[in-house]
Amino acid sequence: MNLSERFKQNWEDQFRHLSSANCYLFVAVSGGLDSIVLTDLIFKSGFDFTIVHCNFQLRGAESERDETFVKALGKKYNKEVLVKKFDTQKFSKEKKIGTQEAARELRYEWFKELIDSIKMTDDRAQETVISHSSSAIFLTTAHHADDNIETVLMKFFRGTGIQGLTGIQALNKKDKIIRPLLFATKEDILTYAKENHLSWVEDSSNESNKYTRNYFRNELIPGLQKVFPDVEENILENIERFNEVNELYQQSIQWYKKKLLVKKDHEFHIPVLLLQKSNPVKTIVWEIIKEFAFTASQADEVIKLFAAENGSYMASASHRIIKNRNWLIIAPLHQSANKNILIEKGEKQIVFEKGALTIKEINEPPFIIDYSPFTALLDASAIQFPLLLRKWKQGDYFYPLGMQKKKKLSRFFIDQKLSLTEKENTWVIESNKKIIWIVGQRIDDRCKITSSAKKAIQITYLK
């Protein structure tokens, strides 16, 4: 079978519940060979889709060339093209991470926002960026067999557990990502492109071995092939075996968790004697504690708690593990409770981690509107105390001032061009489960001051 036939057969085998009749796709396209072939295969398979392109602005004129090329691709297939420009270098410095890691974070955060912005509610899509009637929406990427081999080798040498040896997964249900080319090698993809007279752009950075993946691709794997000519085929077969082993491993871990973890309100209690008798204890401890932001290196410290004095504990960024007689108790840190702050009627000031709020009641007109985003002047009749001050979360929506339709905050942030860090630090105030103010940004239209307002509430944000 040629690549097109194999693509359709693989899709049927791997994603049989998703078809061109019930699935809409975002196709991640860089302009390189792999994504160009993926786009052509998806188009010929009859799917409706939107092309999405990330411009990381890392290669000067070459980055702009790639964007222009992808936009032209949209015209070729008569499909919409969405482009997102990132200040990757700035983000890399802010987060103190490498450029490639920064690009990956930015890319998948945007992809997630796109998916979240058009999740279906009943039979209608709220705040859609596209018009469609599909019941399933997924992102597709052009990862192929060679990428899978490189990923597994990098994780192996860096240090990993069984999960890391399972490679790139073809279907990520949680993040709505499909990788339908994992069955194909780079050679298969190149052959298809030539046979179908496809054009693509070359990324000059792929030749530089300063990036880890390029070193594995250009140096290590070719070197291994000199000693083991079938190394790539062998690794791909091993990945299949590791996936099966991982299924058994996960079943065992779930059995141990069910046996050991006793949930009490927001805490988990573990009987020390029972945990001590479990084998292999270090692996079981790690699988339990990693869900609570602990690191692999802390597993040994948890084991030391078995024999520690009553009241001994260790902490992660979000939880503590406390020795309490014959139990280990996993409990949220106290400060996590402060993520939700009640504002009672009559309170004048609230202090929280991002600053302070002053609250003032104005009992009669005139109401002088301060157009600063740091001041919210709200119709008192539209507000019900107590108010709740909290961080925003996925799924939140409000009616932005001046609009009659609701908008998800995730989409609002895209429109406002907020950075990831700015979004992470956004707080909201809600009244009776309705957001009335995105603190420091925009009030809800339903709470605005009108000519009929008799009383007002003024809230000022002080950084």
Image (cartoon, rainbow, N blue to C red):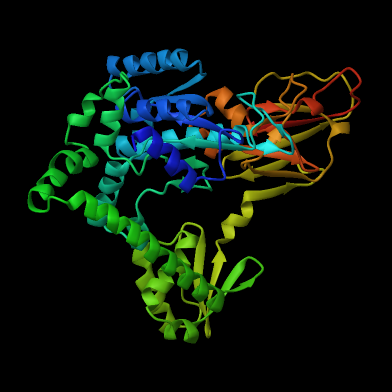
The residue depicted at 21 percent of the width and 49 percent of the height is: 232
In this rendering, does residue 420 appear at all?
no
Residue 137 in view in this figure = yes
The structure residue drawn at horizontal position 67% and vertical position 30%, both measured from the top left corner, is: 133
**Quarter of the image with the N terminus in it:** top left
- The percent coordinates of residue 123 (x first, y second) are 74, 35
Q: Nearer the viewer, residue 79 or 40?
A: 40
Q: Quadrant of the C terminus?
A: top right
- Across and down, in percent, residue 279 comes to 39, 81
Count of numbered labels shown in the rendering? 0
Relative height, residue 171 to residue 288 (above, below): above
Q: Is residue 398 left or right of residue 211?
A: right
Looking at the image, is 161 positioned above or below residue 222?
below
In the displayed structure image, the side of residue 255 where residue 405 appears, left or right: right
Tell me which residue sits at (61%, 36%) in the image. 22
Q: Is residue 419 above or below residue 386?
A: above
Left or right of 449, for residue 6: left
Q: Is residue 423 left or right of residue 402?
A: left
Q: Position of residue 389 (x, y in %)?
A: 69, 43
Asked where in the image residue 412 lies, by quadrant, the reply is top right
The outermost residue toward the left is 226
Q: Decide which of 231, 298 is in the foreground and name it.
A: 231
Q: Residue at x 45, y 66 (%)?
A: 250
Nearer-the-camera pick, 28 or 312: 28
How far across and how far down the image is residue 15, in percent?
Answer: 50, 45
In the current view of this chain or complex, which residue is farthest to the front?
Answer: 1
